[in-house]
Image (cartoon, grey):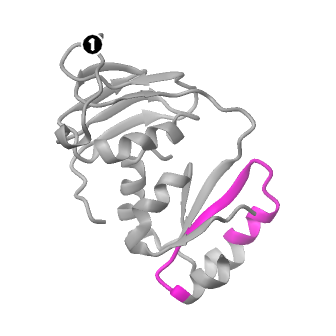
């Protein structure tokens, strides 16, 4: 980890949000884009995230440095941020990263993706260069 | 499989940009660091 974790997140998974907007300033109805560098701290709260998690990743670089972001049910309560529009993409497989390629991962996890219908393994994370080479 | 890339632990955050879910296959007491980092990034 290169960045300190200094903010909180609280959301549920189950339903979807079709639009997530993080606005600059205090008012929820004054969305405006802003540069990443201006954001200092983030507190992201969302009611529910199913598919939009993929889109929320776009917030990651900003969230690490956001001054204040608070999202509840897709609406901005306060804070600064950047507008992110999300839409549910149907038919796309859930993309997995497997972190750690020890014995358990090799015998019980990686092999499972061969039979997965709704998921796919797109990334592995390991400290062993040899394992990384074998798997790619 | 659509395995697109292998990352070192130093590049863990980069891996987050291309996935929806992180499957942490570590002993329990080592989960937090990677789980929190992923959660901050919006992953489940």
State the image coordinates of residue B12 (x, y, percent, origin top left). 43, 66
State the image coordinates of residue A94 (x, y, percent, origin top left). 66, 47
The chain ID associated with circle 1 is A
> From the viewer's perspective, is residue A43 above or below residue A25?
below
Q: Residue furthest bottom?
A: A130
Name the residue: 24% across, 36% down: A35
Q: Nearer the viewer, residue A135 or A34?
A: A34
Q: Is residue B32 left or right of residue A2?
A: right
Q: Which structural element holds mark 1?
A: loop
**Residue A31 shows in the view:** yes
Magenta-colored stretch includes residue A5: no
State the image coordinates of residue A79 (x, y, percent, origin top left). 21, 26
> Crowding at label 1, few (<14), some or many (≥20) Cα neighbours within 10 Å?
few
Name the residue: 48% across, 53% down: B17
Q: In the image, which residues are magenta?
A: A109-129
Q: Is residue A133 left or right of residue B38?
A: right
Quadrant where the C terminus of chain A lies? bottom right
State the residue position of label 1: A30
Q: Is residue B14 left or right of residue B5?
A: left
Quadrant where the N terminus of chain A lies? bottom left
**Residue B31 shows in the view:** no
State the image coordinates of residue A105 (x, y, percent, origin top left). 62, 74
> From the viewer's perspective, is residue A110 above or below residue A85?
below
């Amino acid at each position: 980890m290169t960045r300190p974790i200094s903010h909180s997140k609280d959301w549920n998974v189950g339903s979807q949000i079709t639009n997530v907007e993080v606005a600059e300033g205090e008012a929820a109805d004054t969305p405006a884009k802003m540069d990443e560098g201006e954001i200092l701290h983030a507190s992201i709260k969302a009611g529910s995230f199913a598919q939009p998690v993929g889109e929320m990743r776009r917030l990651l670089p900003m969230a690490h440095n956001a001054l204040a972001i608070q999202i509840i049910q897709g609406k901005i309560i306060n804070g600064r941020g950047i507008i992110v529009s999300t839409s549910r993409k149907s038919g796309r497989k859930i993309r997995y990263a497997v972190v750690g390629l020890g014995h358990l991962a090799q015998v019980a996890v990686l092999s499972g993706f061969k039979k997965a219908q709704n998921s796919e393994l797109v990334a592995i994370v390991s400290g062993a260069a040899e394992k990384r080479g074998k798997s790619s | 499989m659509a395995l697109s890339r292998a990352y070192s632990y130093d590049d863990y955050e980069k891996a987050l940009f291309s996935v929806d879910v992180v499957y942490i296959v570590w002993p329990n007491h080592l989960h937090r660091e990677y789980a929190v980092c992923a959660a901050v990034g919006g992953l489940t």
